[in-house]
Image: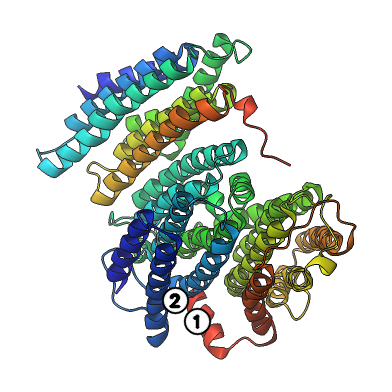
């Protein structure tokens, strides 16, 4: 059951690289939250109430409900619906995504040993690279935010790749990470739209030498 | 002891958010720094030898050294901020004071954490507190800097987290405590260890203000009120140094040690080069001092990269840099009160307008450029000696060239500040004279350390560097 979910997760990453509509971005981030919840639940060896609660808060509450809701709110408030047309084309984005997948597979083959779950490791690497690509090739701040969220999800998967059960501190760290992403969405939602009237990163270049 | 410290510090900071007036903020500030100095005194009483562990914290020599410096700098920052923000509304001022207290407590957590994940959590917490200080002015510039700071730091810290997870995988026991990791990674997979170090260094570079994520620190210092920049550019940078140094110590006992040293050398040289280049380019005194931080932390990274006496020099360099840089940023706050400007090509004649402040800048420049009797002269000489002892002639030549550029840039800019004709209107805040004097205090301490390093301090650093 886990493998189909992981494959679905990879499909969301590919789709994320070619889509240009922000509503789709938000929906995919929500879907990734559901998938991560399912994977985390299936990987639980026993029903441990505190850990179950933690997973529910991390994935279901934050990743699946709160973060996508905030993304939709940002879209509604800023009335920005698409990536900039002058940005990277869909074909180039797909090409980059395939390159990232190839790099992730190569790195996994070179690095992963018996201590690491190869599938999770490879997909986590692909997610991190996909997030970085989104940040680099897309010019709108919204895309950067989505890129960061994709990296966060990649980190979550990575933590599953390196250990079957996450210690308490790892859970706390991941939760803090998610809180940071919610804070960033808050800054975007409450401040940037009001102050800068800006929707792309090009306008965030006043602080420089 | 440490748990009581954290509880009291956070409670006082939270109370400051609700303070009704400036007098209440001052009282809460006094209580907060009484707690800081009480902990510093307790650490001093036990000879910085490390007391009992408290949950995820151990008051070891490394954390204690940097905590004492942090407490002193943070107290000075609080004193300067009161006058610097005299015109602010009480709601803004109390928020600033509370965030400064929370930042100080979060940095302390990063210093004393005995677990790599706890260090990471506190560094993440510093991002939140520092971002609040950066956005203090509510201007477009401060919003842009705050957004970049939160975004890049969060991405960097997420990357560091990947490294931590990989490091945990290389260890056999599954614990993320530094002592347990040091025992368990000795025979860990070298490829994991190397990758983990690169990821952690890359991620923490946003806090340590070294290449490649140094830019966010520079932007943050630029946008934050000048006294807060003194804290960000020293205490917070030291938190990054402590985090990287603890991983470095672990790595030195593994097969990955030569790789780690090479990575630090490359990063250090790149930081020094970036610092030297942008010191020439920038037209803002706060950014200028921030690039000087990039350059100095690059030198510290080179010290770690050389190993041996270079490690001692790196720790000493970072500690003394804290004193000199905090003094210079506080002098910048005084300067801003007079000119209401930071532009290098506009302001000048400072020697006539504020003689004590100008002397502070000139003396600070002399110490920061490592001219004798600067304590940085001791550390840089040791690092250069280490480079020459290793017969890395190309590196020695490169370092000397870059340091010459730094010296030229620094001297020309500070001389311009002191003697070029001024083009801006001059205000004379009543407190500027007193504040210029108080900003000289850490500089005086640095001067003493340049002339005489107490045996206790030498022994303390020796203990820190002994693996």
Query: Can you give x and y, in whole percent of width and height, for residue B248 in the image?
Result: 50, 61
Residue behind mark 2: B61
- Residue B250: assigned label: none
Q: How is the image coloured?
A: rainbow
Q: Dividing the image into 4 quarters, which one contains the N terminus of chain B?
A: bottom left
Dot 2 surroundings within 10 Å: few (below 14), some, or many (20 or more)? many
* Residue at 24% over, 30% down: A61
Q: Nearer the viewer, residue B262 or A85?
A: A85
Q: Secondary structure at mark 1?
A: helix
Q: Nearer the viewer, residue B143 or B296?
A: B143
Q: Are marks 2 and 1 in contact (CB under 8 Å)?
A: yes
Q: Chain of mark 1?
A: B
* Residue at 38% over, 62% down: B109
Taking the image as shown, residue B359 lies to the left or right of residue B245, namely right
Q: Secondary structure at mark 2?
A: helix
Q: Chain of mark 2?
A: B
Query: Can you give x and y, in whole percent of width and height, for residue A49 in the image?
Result: 10, 41
Q: Earlier in the sequence, mark 2 or mark 1?
A: 2
Picture quadrant where residue A114 is located:
top left
Query: Can you give x and y, in whole percent of width and height, for residue B305 in the image?
Result: 61, 62
Residue A173 sits above or below residue B312 on the image: above
Dot 1 surroundings within 10 Å: few (below 14), some, or many (20 or more)? some
Taking the image as shown, residue B4 lies to the left or right of residue B156, namely left
Residue behind mark 1: B460
> Is residue B319 something that shows in the picture?
yes
Residue B280 sits above or below residue A56 on the image: below
């Amino acid at each position: 059951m886990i493998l189909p979910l992981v494959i679905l997760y990879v499909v969301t990453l590919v789709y994320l690289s070619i889509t240009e509509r922000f509503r789709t971005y938000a929906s995919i981030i929500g879907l990734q939250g559901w998938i991560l919840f399912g994977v985390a639940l299936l990987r639980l060896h026993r029903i441990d109430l505190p850990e179950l609660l933690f997973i529910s808060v991390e994935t279901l509450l934050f990743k699946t409900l709160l973060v996508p809701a905030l993304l939709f709110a940002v879209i509604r408030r800023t009335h920005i619906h698409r990536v900039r047309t002058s940005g990277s084309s869909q074909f180039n984005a797909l090409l980059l995504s395939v390159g990232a997948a190839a790099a992730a597979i190569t790195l996994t083959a070179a690095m992963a040993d018996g201590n690491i779950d190869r599938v999770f490791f490879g997909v986590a690497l692909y997610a991190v690279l996909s997030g970085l690509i989104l940040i680099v090739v897309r010019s709108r701040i919204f895309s950067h935010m989505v890129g960061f969220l994709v990296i966060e999800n990649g980190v979550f998967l990575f933590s599953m790749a390196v250990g079957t059960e996450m210690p308490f501190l790892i859970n706390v760290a991941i939760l803090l990470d998610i809180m940071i992403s919610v804070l960033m969405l808050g800054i975007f939602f409450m401040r940037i739209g009001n102050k800068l009237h800006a929707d792309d990163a090009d306008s965030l270049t006043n602080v420089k030498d | 002891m440490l748990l009581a410290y954290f509880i009291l510090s956070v409670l006082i900071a939270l109370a400051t958010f609700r303070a009704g007036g400036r007098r209440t903020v001052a009282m809460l500030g006094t209580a907060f720094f009484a707690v800081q100095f009480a902990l510093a005194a307790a650490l001093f009483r036990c000879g910085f030898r490390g007391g009992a562990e408290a949950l995820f914290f151990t008051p070891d020599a490394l954390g204690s050294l940097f905590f004492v410096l942090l407490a002193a700098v943070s107290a000075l920052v609080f004193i300067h901020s009161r006058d610097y923000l005299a015109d602010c509304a009480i709601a803004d001022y109390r928020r600033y004071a509370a965030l400064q207290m929370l930042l100080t407590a979060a940095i302390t957590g990063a210093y004393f954490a005995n677990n790599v994940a706890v260090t990471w959590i506190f560094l993440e917490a510093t991002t939140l507190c520092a971002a609040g200080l950066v956005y203090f002015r509510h201007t477009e510039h401060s919003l842009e800097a705050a957004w970049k700071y939160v975004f890049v730091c969060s991405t960097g810290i997420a990357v560091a987290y990947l490294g931590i997870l990989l490091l945990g995988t290389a260890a056999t026991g599954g614990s993320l405590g530094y002592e347990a990791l040091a025992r368990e990674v000795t025979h860990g997979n070298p490829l994991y260890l190397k990758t983990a170090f690169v990821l952690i260094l890359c991620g923490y570079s946003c806090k340590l203000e070294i290449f490649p994520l140094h830019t966010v620190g520079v932007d943050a210092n630029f946008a934050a009120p000048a006294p807060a920049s003194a804290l960000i550019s020293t205490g917070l940078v030291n938190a990054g140094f402590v985090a990287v140094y603890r991983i470095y110590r672990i790595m030195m006992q593994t097969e990955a040690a030569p790789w780690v040293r090479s990575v630090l050398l490359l990063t250090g040289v790149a930081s020094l080069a970036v610092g030297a280049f942008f010191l020439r380019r920038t037209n803002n005194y706060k950014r200028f001092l921030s690039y000087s931080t990039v350059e100095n932390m690059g030198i510290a990274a080179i010290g770690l990269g050389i190993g041996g006496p270079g490690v001692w020099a790196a720790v000493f360099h970072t500690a003394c840099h804290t004193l000199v840089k905090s003094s210079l940023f506080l002098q910048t706050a005084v300067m801003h009160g007079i000119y209401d400007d930071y532009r290098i090509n506009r302001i000048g004649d400072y020697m006539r307008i504020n003689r004590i402040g100008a002397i502070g800048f000139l003396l600070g420049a002399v110490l920061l450029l490592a001219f004798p009797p600067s304590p940085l002269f001791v550390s840089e000489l040791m690092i250069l000696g280490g480079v020459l002892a290793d017969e890395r002639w190309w590196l020695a030549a490169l370092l000397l060239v870059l340091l010459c550029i730094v010296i030229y840039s620094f001297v020309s800019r500070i001389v311009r500040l002191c003697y070029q004709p001024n083009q801006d209107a001059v205000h004379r805040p009543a407190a500027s004279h007193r504040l210029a004097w108080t900003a000289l205090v850490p500089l005086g301490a640095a001067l003493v350390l340049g002339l005489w390093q107490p045996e206790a301090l030498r022994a303390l650093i020796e203990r820190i560097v002994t693996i």
